[in-house]
Amino acid sequence: LPARSAPIPNLPSVTLSEFELILKDSAKSVLSVELSGPKSETALVRLVDGTEFGISDLVESSVDPRSPLKLVAKCRLYNIPVRNATLADVGGVVGGSGKKKKV
């Protein structure tokens, strides 16, 4: 069974197809997209004016067009930065910046 996105409480949300329309019409108004959750099934979109909303119908699946990977690919087409909050949190605990240090 594919994992469905969990809605973010008290936050407006749009479907992935509605978000794609926003990208086509006004991609420059999107500041960033942040993915979270064990399978990156929760997306938080930030606009340049500070508005935030979620994407409600992400499905973790290799064949479904609503997958987080398809969302990331679409954002790359429009040069919108995508951050995976779950991976960033783990990276901060494990090794910090990831740069090699001279001894």
Image (cartoon, grey):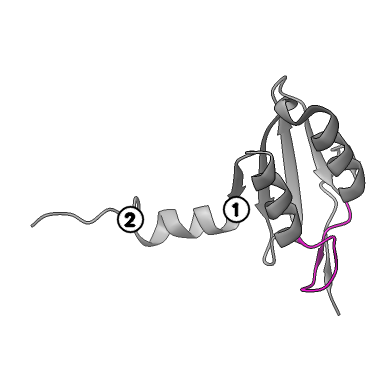
Q: Is residue 25 above or below residue 19?
A: above
92 horizontally vs 74: left or right:
left
Q: Residues within 10 Å of mark 2 (few under 14, many from 20)?
A: few
Name the disc covering residue 84, or none. Answer: 1
Q: Is residue 44 above or below residue 2?
A: above
Q: Which residues are magenta?
A: 56-67
The three-letter code of the residue at mark 1 reads Asn
Q: Main secondary structure of the magenta part?
A: loop
Q: Is residue 28 above or below residue 40?
A: above
> Residue 31, located in which quarter of the rendered image?
top right
Residue 3 location (% of width, % of height): 81, 70
Name the disc covering residue 98, or none. Answer: 2
| Residue drawn at x 80%, y 36% as measured from the top left | 23
Q: Say if the magenta span includes residue 51.
A: no
Q: Which of the two residues, 18 or 14, is positioned nearer the viewer here?
A: 18
The three-letter code of the residue at mark 2 reads Gly
Q: From where the camera sits, is residue 76 visible?
A: yes
Q: Give the Cα separation between the discs numbered 1 and 2.
A: 16 Å
Q: Residues within 10 Å of mark 1 (few under 14, many from 20)?
A: some
Residue 88 location (% of width, % of height): 51, 53
Q: Earlier in the sequence, mark 1 or mark 2?
A: 1
